[in-house]
Each structure stands twice: as structure tokens, then as C-alpha cells.
Image: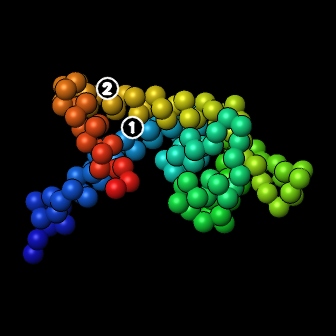
Amino acid sequence: MTSVNDASQTDHVARLLGEALRRVRQEILSTSEEHFPGLRVSHYRLLELIPPEGARITDLAEVALMTKQGLGQHVDYLQKLGYTTSDRLPEDRRVRLVRRTTTGDAAVAYSHAAIARIEQTWSTRLGPTRYATLRQTLQELGATP
């Protein structure tokens, strides 16, 4: 019987990228609960997507690749915790405009700092040239063909 921990059988690019992403998530969440209780990585991502002037639920859902209902639930949760606010537009009461609060802005700054730490660690580990190549390669692979 093979161990479920035998990574040699699954050393494909999806697993490798997943492990790198797992490391980023670990860094973001390492002290998250003490600074920003209740947030998961998906919440940090959503907060980051909200521009300073705010955004409509529909637009955020499209960018986040989520349903309006699912995104609305995330926004409601973040609002309950004080990370976002939302208001109905006076010209169209069906539309919710979502904005980050000061606490939401601080959470985004926190996640950016965590990501910067990971980038610094990886740059030191790989060397600046190899790290720059990694970033460029990921940008190319992530670009729309």
C-alpha cells in the first residue's frame, strides 16, 4: 500500500504551485487571528479587490469569479466584523456599493506585508535573478493567451 504522503507520484506543476500557494497562505495567516479576527485568505483577497471608491457587488463577483450571492455572503460577513460597509445607490436601490473601512484597509496592508515577506524570503533563497525570472514566468503563464 502506498502512503498518501508519497509526493513523488504527484510532482506535477499543479501540486508544486499549490505548495507555493500554501506557503503564502501560511504566512498571511501566521498572526492574522490576533490582528484581524475572523479573516481567511479568501477574505483578504476580496478586501484587496475593493477599490478606494468602492465597487458594486456585481462587479466584485465578476472579478472574484464568484456568484453575486456568494460574494454578497462574504461581504455581509466582512461587514458584520467591521471590515467593510455597503450602501444602496440612491439612483438604483437594487445596487449595493461596497467599501472597505479603515480596519479593512489595515487588513489589506497586513496581507500585503505578509506577501512582501514571502517575496523577500523567496528572493533571498533563489537569488534576485532567479526570483525575477520566476515572477516573469508566472506573469507570462497567467496572462490571457
The x, y position of residue 14, in whole percent, is 26, 58
Q: Nearer the viewer, residue 141 or 127?
A: 141
Number of other residues with Cα within 10 Å of mark 1, as a class: few under 14, some 14 to 19, many 20 or more: some
Q: Position of residue 32 (x, y in %)?
A: 51, 38
Q: Is residue 118 depicted above or below 137 in this figure?
A: above
Instruction: Point out the image quarter for the C terminus.
Output: bottom left
Name the mark on residue 59: none
Residue 1 horizontal/vertical position (percent): 9, 75
Q: Sequence-wise, which precedes: disc 2 or disc 1?
A: 1
Q: Is residue 37 visible?
A: no
Residue farthest to the right, as pictured: 90
- Quarter of the view holding residue 101: top right
Q: Nearer the viewer, residue 34 or 66?
A: 66
Residue 54 is left or right of residue 41, and the answer is: right
Q: What is the spatial separation of the Cα atoms under label 2 and label 1, in whole angstroms? A: 12 Å
The residue drawn where x is 84% and y is 51% is 89
- Residue at point 79%, 57% (across, down): 95
Q: Nearer the viewer, residue 90 or 117?
A: 90
Residue assigned mark 1: 27
| Residue ranking furthest to the bottom | 1
Expressed as whole percent of the image width and height from the top left, the position of residue 114 reads 43, 32
Above/below status of 138 relative to 124: below
What amino acid is found at the position of numbered circle 2 in the picture? Gln
Q: Nearer the viewer, mark 2 or mark 1?
A: 2
Asked if residue 143 lies left or right of residue 69, the reply is: left
Q: What amino acid type is highlighted by mark number 1?
A: Glu
Secondary structure category for the residue under label 1: helix
Q: Name the residue carrying label 2.
A: 120
The chosen color scheme is: rainbow
